[in-house]
Amino acid sequence: MPRSQPTARQRRLGTELRKMRDAAGVTARRAAELIGTNPIQMSQVEAGKAGISEARLRYMASQYACFDTALLDALVAMAGERGKGWWEEYRGLLAHGALDLAELEHHATHMRMLQASYVPGLLQTETYIRALMAYAVPPLPPQHLDALVSFRVRRREVLSQDSAIAFSALIHESVLRTRVADRKVAREQLAFILEQSERPNVTVRVIPFDVDGFGGAGNSMLYVGGPVPQLDTAQIDAMHGSFWMDAESELTRYRALLDKAEASSLAVGASRDFIHRIAQEI
């Protein structure tokens, strides 16, 4: 029975298998024959709607002349995932995109973020989150609002667990000065950013208003590292949804944009002093 709503990670596995097949110049019909299935089943596998065994995946890769062991092992690991992450508790309550983001963060090897609109989700306090979500039009039902808040708070655990990944956040000064609620919430939020920045795996740098040459305020983004570079993902939020990019040309572009933004930011120590000063001014 095909999956009615494959996750972004399941779709990504299918996409990578299709890329591998296309690079080898093998048709979908021929690929189906190689693993003893039919074209419809093959199409479902490449769309993330059906799973694939390790034996079949490795055999296909050998027929595609794929000799990238690291990539193949990463794809096999993706195909073999059977457990359900904590985010599954929210399935049916929250949008699929939110759950996909939590899963992406869970499997990340590192993350880089540029934010010129809001405090990065992984650095938000509960009161900041609630104020942000309460701004929605039409207003969210209380139960749904509570679920969104608890979900985002739980996402922060990826930065504090034993195998915590490296997280680098570039935050524009406008984000730090915007009060989504009141002064008390704003001060608590700035204090929390400073607290989290003391973690050895978390780096926070500020892009001040008066820096020259920064034209990237409209480029808020998240860049998530995969187990191999080919499985990196760039994620962009927009008013009408979230967009995920995984083509190498797109990933190269977003890495370059992050590098340019970082060049406009203050050093880590200077950024901490800058945040302290804003907290005193609010």
Image: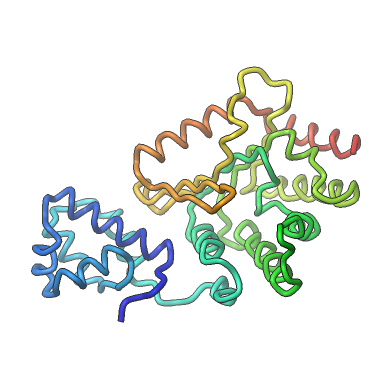
Rendered position, 89 above or below 249: below
Q: Residue furthest bottom?
A: 1
Instruction: Identify the residue at horizontal 59%, vertical 69% (top origin).
Output: 94
Rendered position, 44 above or below 249: below
Rendered position, 119 above or below 133: above
Where residue 85 sits: x, y (%)?
52, 72
Horizontal placement of 52 versus 12: left or right? left
Instruction: Identify the residue at horizontal 69%, vertical 34% (top origin).
Output: 172
Q: Quadrant of the C terminus?
A: top right
Instruction: Identify the residue at horizontal 48%, vertical 60% (top origin).
Output: 107
Where residue 65 sits: x, y (%)?
13, 53
Where residue 237 sits: x, y (%)?
56, 48
The mark tally for this picture is 0
Horizontal placement of 31 versus 81: left or right? left
Question: How is the structure coloured here?
Answer: rainbow
Quadrant location of residue 250?
top left
Horizontal placement of 225 versus 79: left or right? right
Rendered position, 217 above or below 220: above
Q: Residue furthest front?
A: 138
Instruction: Identify the residue at horizontal 42%, vertical 47% (top origin).
Output: 245
Q: Quadrant of the N terminus?
A: bottom left
Horizontal placement of 213 versus 66: left or right? right
Where residue 9 sits: x, y (%)?
41, 62
